[in-house]
Image: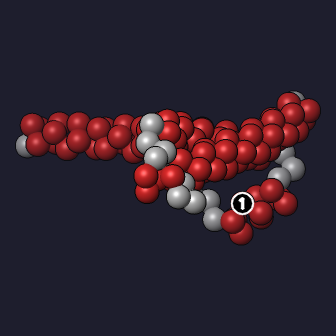
Amino acid sequence: MKRSLQIAIALAGALVTLTAAADSINPPQVGKAELRRMMRDAHTSAQYHVLAGYFRAQQKHFEQQAEVEREEWIRRSANVSGPAAKYPRPVDSSKNRYEYFMAEAQEMDRQAAHYESLSAGLN
């Protein structure tokens, strides 16, 4: 009986650890309406801190996507002849996606900095 209880506790601890690790890897999933509500209702330092954390996580997510797309852009740049030379070229598509992800990451950085400054101003 003690042995099965110890195993159950160990498994529960591992599950909590894995869930926390997964949350730190993936940005929190918040709907647009909920995000707008959070932004509208934020008045305390803690609320601003939560918003800043959300935007930092989004920034990291977009930077990771941009890095993947940059590697694809480099790969596609090696072959720009034949069918790949016709418009729209696959290399152009990768470049545009890379630039989009970087622009989104910069916007998330701007938003996070704004909420970090608001949070620091209330402390």
Residue at far front of view: 82
What residue is disc 1 on? Answer: 35
Residue found at x 44% / y 42%: 79
Residue found at x 67% / y 45%: 99
Q: Judge the density around disc 1: few (<14), some (14-19), many (≥20) Cα neighbours within 10 Å.
A: some
Residue 108 visible in the shown view:
no
Residue at far right of view: 121
Residue found at x 37% / y 37%: 17
Q: Amino acid at mark 1?
A: Leu
Q: Quadrant of residue 98?
A: top right
Q: Position of residue 20 (x, y in %)?
A: 44, 40
Q: 115 left or right of 72?
A: right
Quarter of the image that includes the N terminus: top left
What color scheme is it? Answer: secondary structure
Q: Quadrant of residue 12?
A: top left
Q: Position of residue 66 (x, y in %)?
A: 57, 41
Q: 17 left or right of 53?
A: left
> Residue 81 or 28: which is nearer the viewer?
81
